[in-house]
Amino acid sequence: MSTPTLKLPARAPLLSRTGWGAWLAALIVLCALVPLLNLVVPATSAFHLSDFAVALVAKIMCYAICALAMDLIWGYTGILSLGHGLFFALGGYAMGMYLMRQIGTDGNYKSNLPDFMVFLDWKTLPWHWTFSDSFVATLFLVVAVPGLVAFVFGYFAFRSRIKGVYFSIITQAMTFAAMLLFFRNETGFGGNNGFTDFKRILSIPIATPSMRMTLFVMTSVTLLLFFLMGRWLVNAKFGRVLQAVRDAETRVMFSGYNPIGYKLTIWTISAMMCGVAGALYVPQVGIINPSEMSPANSIEIAIWAAVGGRATLIGPIVGAFIVNGAKSWLTVAYPEFWLYFLGALFIGVTLYLPDGVVGLVKKITGMKGVAK
């Protein structure tokens, strides 16, 4: 008598045909059309894209990477982190240390040491600046430092079965403690001023139009590749286990899976994505200081994911653009109302749009399809 076999469902494609078309269209627009409109089209033309617009979009794309990372840990795993701003800042500080070393003797004090160290009468670099003059080592540290911090924190938190609001509070406390630590001058991270006045990257002037556009394209490609990586993760067996952990962790354990390893893995990957975002952010914005670790910044990352729509991957990217686009306009036109708007937006989405903007669009298009 033959034993019946259980046939597992086929793995979903990475993207549908329409999805690949949209992905390629985004790649062409960001990596070809935007550079053309900014560098080639004359500034007097109505089609010219200003340097301000390019810098704003680049900054929001860095935020979108953080929102995408938040979706993997919150939307697909059900773990709300209020500490992702720390991982973003750690990646930014790793890149900022390299950029400070690239200044060389062009600083105000004409010293090989960064200006703030000369001001504090330091004679040598601290030990944690040892590899800061190497670009290759910096690329490694951008990923390794946030990943290591996340791994150590997550290992003890998940093994202790800390979850829910308690985990969120602890991550927020961790971020706040790190911010206070980086504010201290003796830590060697520039105190409350942080790092700024960058001049070169890979010995190439950082303020030139070509370098600015190179960083823009790198940010665009990184965001698009991270989106594909996210799709690959959530469509795999690994992603299905994450969603099962989100919906019923106890049942996952009874099914023979250890959720700790899955949670720790996606938590670490999410932190490393934020580190990469921070490293891309710093040379384009021109400054990194402890305020990037403020708990409010981490809360905003969660808001971007909620506004766009959790567990969709594209939703957090959309949410980052909506919220930060509105912030860019409101902080200029109505600066005193910005925080009220942000709070009202989050409350409104929580009460009336639990699936976010992308969920609303899907619902409307689904209703139209039924009507037809």
Image (cartoon, grey):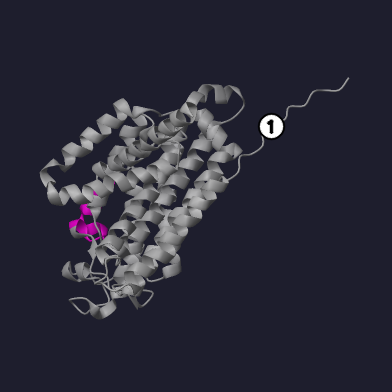
* Above or below, comparing residue 327 to residue 199 in the picture: above
Residue 191 covered by magenta stretch = yes
Q: Quadrant of the N terminus?
A: top right
Q: Position of residue 196 (x, y in %)?
A: 23, 65
Kindly indicate the quadrant of the structure image that contains residue 289.
bottom left
Residue at image mark 1:
8
Q: Is residue 180 visible?
A: no
Residues in magenta?
Answer: 178-192
Left or right placement of residue 26 versus residue 351 in this view: right
**Nearer the observer, 245 or 26:** 26
Q: Position of residue 81 (x, y in %)?
A: 36, 37
Instruction: Examine the residues drawn in magenta and state their main secondary structure.
Output: helix
The residue positioned farthest toward the top in the image shown: 1
Q: Please, what is the three-letter code of the amino acid marked with disc 1?
A: Leu
Residue 304 covered by magenta stretch = no
**Nearer the observer, 363 or 183:** 363
The residue positioned farthest toward the right in the image shown: 1
**Nearer the observer, 154 or 221:** 221
Q: Tell me if mark 1 has few (under 14), some (14-19) or many (20+) residues whose alpha carbon lies within 10 angstroms of its own.
A: few
Instruction: Assign a secondary structure to mark 1.
Output: loop
In the image, what residue occupies the spot 40% across and 60% down? 219
